[in-house]
Image (spheres, rainbow, N blue to C red):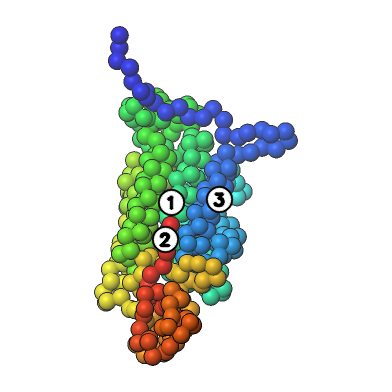
Amino acid sequence: MPPLTLLASIPSPSVSVWEIGPFSLHLYGLCIALGVVAAVTISSRRWQARGGHPDDITTIALWAVPAGVIGARLYHVITDWKKYQDDWAGALNITQGGLGIPGGIALGVIVGLIVVRRNGWPTRDLLDVVAPAIPVAQAIGRLGNWFNQEVFGKPSDLPWALEIDLEHRPAGLEHHETFHPTFLYEGLWNLALAGFLVWLDRRKALRRGELFLLYVFGYSIGRLWVENIRSDEASLILGVRVNIWMSVIVALVSAAVFAWNRRKPAPVGDLAPAGAGVTGAGAQPLPEDGSDAAGGRPDEPGDGDAAEPDATGSDDGDGDPDTDPDDSDGGDDGGHRRDAGRGGPAD
């Protein structure tokens, strides 16, 4: 008997649109929507764990998500403008794919930051909050390419190669039946990146804002090698795909910003876990400068903390709880003062 193989190839879906009565549900768009829901849910929980209100994330998403879709489409049309020079109306049709992730991230983040600044929320903390959520959304969204049978890789005979129908194969590759499943490669890379960022966040070794920089760097590196094996047509600069140039530039810039941020010792309040803040009912996220909610720097000497009653309720023999100010040395007695650099678990 011939040896059994667990997987000979990955089949492509036979349909990319579900017809529901008079309505058509494009599965590409459904994957994008599910990715957005996942990102908002993850970000809301991470933000709440830092003392923020989960509705803040929804407020940001209401502006950042549409901007991200517009930015993604603009990036795709600009970098592949030759596809639309005879059909500019087709540039508005996103149901058949054609969303450039770099443009979506760029415009989505810019608009999101405008919303954050207008509401007075801490910018770097929120960037760190969404850092692991974005690659999860990207991984889910990549499934849309699977349904559309698009942006797959070069021909491959690996056991996990992707079957592509004849009408979707690139010119000159019609005789090949299976190709590298780049949607799967990038999806798995993004999920691994998200897991790594969460793990690193819990290590409490990063400064505020650095987790997002590592996301940008990590995604660019992953996109670099995936882009190198894609078989679809793309605009070239000096014989190299535009997205490869973009990945290199973004990776270098994010690494440079990270190194620049590390050139000096961290200021007080910036040594907290990435995005960490204060947990508990009614707590507020830390301000950008690392000061506490009342406006002062954390644990400043001589800040005049008032003595508080002994939490144990012990007395000194007179029947009343011991609240004698003379028994207090004005220092931190194990819980009365909040350290702005430490909060509850990040996730």
Residue 309 horizontal/vertical position (percent): 46, 81
Q: Closer to the N terminus: mark 1 or mark 3?
A: 3
Task: Identify the mark at residue 37; answer none if there is no mark.
Answer: 3
Which of 223 and 212 lies nearest the eye of the viewer? 212
The amino acid type of the residue labelled 1 equals Pro
Image quarter in which the C terminus is found? bottom left
Residue 162: % across, % down: 41, 30
**Please, which residue is most extreme toward the top here?**
1
Whole-angstrom CA distance, mark 2 to mark 1, is: 18 Å
Residue drawn at the location 37% of the way across and 87% of the way down: 327
CA gap, disc 2 and disc 3: 20 Å
- Count the marks: how many? 3
Q: Residue at x 39, y 80 (%)?
A: 298
Real-space Cα separation, disc 1 to disc 3, in angstroms: 13 Å
- Name the residue carrying label 1: 135
* Residue receiving disc 2: 346
- Badge 3 marks a residue whose secondary structure is helix
Q: Residues within 10 Å of mark 3 (few under 14, many from 20)?
A: some
Crowdedness near tag 1: few (<14), some (14–19) or many (≥20) residues, C-alpha within 10 Å: many
Q: Residue at x 34, y 49 (%)?
A: 222
Task: Give the residue type that dot 2 points to.
Answer: Ala
Secondary structure under the numbered disc 2 in the rendered image: loop
Image coords of residue 43 (percent x, y):
49, 57
